[in-house]
Image (spheres, rainbow, N blue to C red):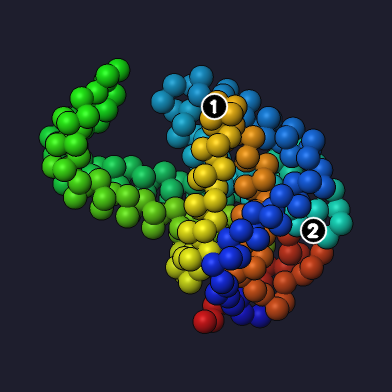
Amino acid sequence: MALRIQSVGPARGWHWLANGFALFARTPLVWVALVAVAAVAAFALSLLGRVGPLLLTLLVPGLMGGLLMGCRELESGGSLRVAHLAAGFLYRGARLVAVGGLYLVGTIVIGELMIMTGGGALEQLLEAAAQPNPDPQRLQELLGAASPAVFSGMGLFLLLLMGTWYAPPLVVFHDLKVLESVRLSLMGCFRNILPMLVYGAITYVVSGIAAMLLGAFGPLMLVPVLLPSSYTSYREIFIDAGESQQAGPPSGGQGAGESG
């Protein structure tokens, strides 16, 4: 059966968060435990120096894939378990790590392009911004000189983020290859740009409030809600008439096409 990309109204961005919270509310303690385990693993990787963040980037899609499988179990009346952290690696590990690799290479390439096009102005901007008490006027001057590189880099990074946002569920639930999942993820985001903007704006505001109230731990506490909300948005955007409604990944190796 063909995989259809559905366009929805802007207000659905709020409903994705509300429905994600409903999934979180079914087993809040398990969600918090899962995020805590993932945070400890991320901290452990950070102890490896420069290699740690690179490994974490490779592993994030696999972790996300497993947790999305847990969301599907919750949706169908099953239970979420700590073992779901590893489920993505056990089911589609190589492809999910490849998605992380594509994201990692993309960020490196975008960074190099920004340096090439921004030249000395971009390097000076980064150095000035890192100072304890940067001069606002100097920052404004440097930002004006480096703005073409900054804004072009932001645009490219946004495209990369859109291309990898729905890649994990498309790999796990539809058995898609990496590049096909990235292509359809990009199309799904473009066709739903307005609800995605609403979703992003609400998330930004709530994260800011959480940071003011709880400091650095505030945004981290929102992760158990944002993960299931990404699943509810995926379920609404990507429609597959042949998809099994049972919990867990589909049993077959069936490919998926796309139609408007």
**How far is disc 1 from disc 2 in space, using C-alphas?**
31 Å
Residue 236: which quarter of the image?
A: bottom right
The three-letter code of the residue at mark 2 reads Glu
Total tally of numbered discs in the picture:
2
Residue at 27% x, 19% y is 133
Q: Is residue 50 above or below residue 146?
A: above
| Picture quarter with the N terminus | bottom right
Q: Is residue 47 above or below residue 92?
A: above
Q: Which residue is mark 1?
A: 216
| Lateral position of residue 114 relative to residue 193, left or right | left
Looking at the image, which is closer to me, 186 or 28? 28
Residue 41: percent from the left, percent from the top? 61, 28
Q: Which residue is mark 2?
A: 75
Kind of element beneath mark 1: loop
- Is residue 203 in view? yes
| Lateral position of residue 137 relative to residue 247, left or right | left
Residue at 36% x, 51% y is 157
Looking at the image, which is closer to me, 197 or 57? 197
Residue 180: percent from the left, percent from the top? 49, 66
- Is residue 255 in view? no
Kind of element beneath mark 2: helix
Query: Which-is-in-front pick, marks 1 and 2?
Result: 1
Residue at the far right: name it.
77
The three-letter code of the residue at mark 1 reads Ala
Residue at 82% x, 47% y is 26
Marked residue nearer the N-terminal end (1 or 2)? 2
Q: Residues within 10 Å of mark 2 (few under 14, many from 20)?
A: some
Q: Is residue 246 above or below residue 129?
A: below
